[in-house]
């Protein structure tokens, strides 16, 4: 019974406008601004220290290793791949965490690129942080 009640509360929160959504969108906007400015530290500010990332090259563990995988895009103090934006498809509460389904877009640089991302956010001391990122 208690599980059904939690599911019902989660559904009502999602339908009524999850207050976490604004914080997550703001964090993603700030991260994208860091990408656009060619500032890797600012872009990576959204990741928790213990985050994991899954992409075309496999699983990467930890914020420092994830940053290393992005470092070549930030050579010379600018981002060579274009301006980053997100198209939000769904933000779903999962207990105290949030799962974000989105399409990412890069425009400029080498033309246009886009792909899908699934992000798991957790509320940490510094705000909403990505603990898991699967992007393709």
Image (spheres, rainbow, N blue to C red):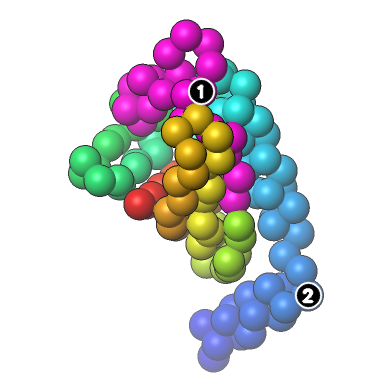
Look at the numbered disc 1 and give the secondary structure of its residue. loop
Q: In this view, does 57 lie above or below 35?
A: below
Residue closest to the far bottom? 1
**Residue receiving disc 2:** 16
Number of numbered callouts drawn: 2
Which quarter of the picture shows residue 70? top left
Which quarter shows the N terminus?
A: bottom right
For disc 1, the marked residue is 79
Q: Where is residue 92 in the image (x, y as percent from the top left)?
A: 57, 68
Mark 2 Cα shell of 10 Å, populated few (<14), some (14-19), many (≥20): few
Q: Residue 123, position in %: x, y?
A: 60, 46
Question: If you read the primary sequence from the N terminus, does the residue marked by circle 1 or circle 2 appear first?
Answer: 2
Would residue 55 be found to the left or right of residue 70 on screen?
Answer: left
**2 or 11, which lies in front?**
11
* Disc 2 element: helix
Q: Magenta segment, which residues?
A: 66-86
């Amino acid at each position: 019974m208690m599980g059904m009640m939690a599911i019902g509360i989660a559904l009502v929160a999602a339908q009524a406008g999850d207050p976490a959504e604004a914080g997550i969108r703001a964090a993603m906007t700030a991260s994208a601004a860091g990408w656009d400015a060619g500032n890797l530290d600012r872009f990576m500010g959204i990741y928790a220290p213990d985050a994991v990332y899954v992409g075309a090259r496999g699983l990467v563990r930890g914020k420092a290793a994830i940053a290393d995988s992005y470092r070549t895009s930030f050579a010379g103090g600018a981002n060579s791949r274009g301006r980053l934006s997100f198209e939000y498809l769904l933000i779903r509460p999962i207990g105290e965490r949030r799962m974000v389904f989105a399409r990412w877009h890069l425009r400029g640089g080498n033309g246009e690129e886009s792909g899908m991302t699934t992000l798991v956010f957790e509320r940490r001391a510094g705000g909403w942080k990505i603990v898991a990122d699967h992007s393709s």
